[in-house]
Image: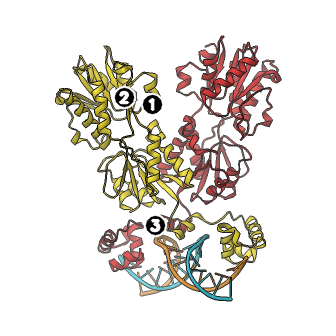
Chain colours: A yellow, B red, C orange, D cyan
Amino acid sequence: MSDVARAAGVSPMTVSYTYNQPDRVSAESRAKVQQAAAVLGYAGPDPSARSLRYGATRTLGVVLGEHLTYAFDDPQAVAFLAGIAEVCAERGCGLLIVPTGTGDDDRNRVVAAAVDAYVVWTTTDDDPVLAAACGTRRPVVIHGGPDRDGTTLVGIDNRAAARAAGAEVFATARRPAVLSFPIDRNRHTFVRCGVDPDTVAYPVTRDRLAGYRDAARDLGIDWSQVPVGVCSTNDMAEARTVMRQLLASTPRLDAVAAMSDHLALAALREAASPLRVSGWDDSDIAREHNLTTVAQSLREQGAACATAAFGDPAPDHRGAWRLVRRASTGG
Amino acid sequence: MSDVARAAGVSPMTVSYTYNQPDRVSAESRAKVQQAAAVLGYAGPDPSARSLRYGATRTLGVVLGEHLTYAFDDPQAVAFLAGIAEVCAERGCGLLIVPTGTGDDDRNRVVAAAVDAYVVWTTTDDDPVLAAACGTRRPVVIHGGPDRDGTTLVGIDNRAAARAAGAEVFATARRPAVLSFPIDRNRHTFVRCGVDPDTVAYPVTRDRLAGYRDAARDLGIDWSQVPVGVCSTNDMAEARTVMRQLLASTPRLDAVAAMSDHLALAALREAASPLRVSGWDDSDIAREHNLTTVAQSLREQGAACATAAFGDPAPDHRGAWRLVRRASTGG
DNA sequence: CTGTTAGCGCCTTCAG
DNA sequence: CTGAAGGCGCTAACAG
C-alpha cells in the first residue's frame, strides 16, 4: 500500500480511504491511486492485515466432525452446510471449513483458524475438537449436542421425536428392534439388547435411544429385551449386515425403529416377512419408499446455527420436527 | 501475548516459542507460560497476526458460482467440494467458501478473502467474480473453464466426450435433439434449432454442444435442424417442461443427448414413444435407470484443483472420462 | 480533503 | 535457553 501511495504521490491514508471510504477522497486522488494500483498490480488491502487491525475476520468456522471427508457424503450434513452458507452469503461473511480427520493435529487447526465464531456439527461430550473450539473463547454453536456451558445449542428434541416415532412403529409390535447410529467414537458395529441410553456418548443418539425406550415402556414392552443394532456409519450396505444379524438373533422381528431413512430402507430390503419400519429425516428415500419418518430441516437448523454464531437471536428448533406417517407403519 | 508474558514473568518471545517451538523453551518456563495462559484465557497466537507475519493464510478459497446456495443442491458440485476438502484436510489447510450470489458485492468479497489461492467452479468467460479472483494475483485454478492466461485449468475434454456420447445416442436417430445447460448468465429457458456453440458463454456447455454437433455431422445429420432445449438449471421439473416443448416442435423426436443425468431422466419421463437418451456424470440416477452416460469423477477433479492451487503438479484430467453404454441407447 | 502518528499481535533476526 | 528491536500491512484518531 505504501508503494502505491508513493507511486501515486499521496499518503498511505489516501490509498486506504480510496478503498474503504471512496467518497472521502477527491476524484482526482482516487484516479491517481487507482492508476498506480493498476500499474503495480495492487488489488486492495491485505485481508490478514485488515483482520488484525479490525480484530475480526468476518468469517465463520465450521467443524464437520471427526472426518471432514465423510461429511460431504451425508446429505443431511450437506443440507446443514447449505443453511450455514445461505446466512454467510447474506451477510457477506466467509465460511471456513476447518479440516479435521487427521487425529491430534485437529485441535491445533481449530485453535489456529482465522474465524470469529464456530458452528460445530453434533459430536460426543468428550470430543477434543469441541473442547478446542470452546477453549478459543470464540462463540460456539453446537448442532444437536452436546449442550455445554457457554455454548448455544440448536436442534430438535430428539427424545420427544423418537418417542413419537417409537409409539407409531412399535404400536402393534411383539418383537421390536432399533437400528442405531454409533454409541461412541470407536464406532463399533454390534447388536445388543436393551442398550442403556446413558452409556451413549453421542447426545443425539442417546436422546433418540431414550425416546425409543420411552415409547417401548409406554407400550409395556420390556426394553431389556429389545435388540439394538448399532451401525458404524449411515451406510446402507453395512446396515443390511446389521439387519441380518438382528433377524438371526430375533427370528420373528416385526418392527424396526431406525435413526435414518437409509438405515430404515436397509431394514426393509432385508426383511423377509412383513415389518413395520420408521426412519428419520424425511429424505427423498423416505418419500420414494413410503417410509414413516421424523421430518426435520437440517437446512434451517444450519441457518439457525449460523445466525446464532453471529450473535443474533435464532429461532428455537426444539419443536421443529413432525412425525410423517406413511405405509411403512401400516399407513 | 504480552499480557501472558508479563503474568508468567517472561518475555513475549518465550511465550511465542512455547507455542511454536516448545523444545526451545525450558520445561519450567513452558509451565509458567501455560499456567499464565490458562489463567488469562489465552488460547494461542492470533491467527490473523500470524498470517500477516507469515504472509500466508494456509487457506484455500473456493468460488462456487453465481449462487453459492444452489451449489449445495448440485450433487456434482458437492462431490467436487468433497475432493477439495480431502486435499485441504491432508494438508491441514482451511477451506474458505467465498459467499457469492448477491451481485455487485461478490467481487469485493473475493478480493477481501484471506486465502492463498482460489479454486473457481466453472463459469463464463466474462464472469466479474472470476476476473476479481485473477486480479488478486493469487494462483487461480478453474474447473471446467474458461481457460485464462495465468490460471490453471482442470477438467475433462468435454467436446470429445460429447462427440462420443452423441455418436452413441444419435447413431440410429432421424430426429435428434439436445437438452442443454444455460448458454449465458441470463439463464433463459428456450428451444431453438442449431444453436451455434460459438455463441455460448459457458465453456463447458459450449464444448459439449460442439461435441454433439461434431457427432451429428459425423452421422450426416444437419445440425441446423437439430433442436436444442436450453434449461436454466439442472432441475428435473423444468427440464420436463422443456422436453414437452421439444416434443411439440419435433413430433417424431427419437434421440436426446442431455448434459446431465437429471435432464436425461426428465426426457425419458416425458417421452411417449421409444427414445434414445444419453446423460452425463454417471450418477446414481444413471445407474438406476440404465442411462448411457459420460462418466467422470468430480471428486477427483476437485482434489486435482486443490492440489494445483497449492502449487503442486496435478494429474491431467482431459482424458479422465468414459462413455458408459447402457440400455437407454439400445443396450 | 489529506497527512501524521501509533499500534493491532506476531515472529525473524540477532545479541546476550 | 532467553530477550530486544523491528516491521509485516493496515486504519482509528486526530491534526492540518
Q: Are discs 2 and 1 less than 8 Å apart at CB?
A: yes
Residue A263, percent from left and from top: 36, 28
Question: Looking at numbered disc 2 in the image, what kind of residue is underneath it?
Answer: Gly
Residue B170, percent from left and from top: 72, 18
Question: Looking at numbered disc 3 in the image, what kind of residue is underneath it?
Answer: Asp
Question: What residue is disc 2 on?
Answer: A279
Closer to the camera, A138 or B22? A138
Secondary element at tag 3: loop
Residue at mark 2 to residue at mark 3: CA–CA distance: 45 Å
Residue under the image location 32 percent in, 35 percent down = A161
Q: Nearer the viewer, mark 2 or mark 3?
A: 2
Q: Are discs 2 and 3 less than 8 Å apart at CB?
A: no
Mark 2 crowd level (few <14, some 14–19, many ≥20, 10 Å Cα): many
Question: What residue is disc 1 on?
Answer: A283
Secondary element at tag 1: loop
Secondary element at tag 2: loop
Question: What residue is disc 3 on?
Answer: B46
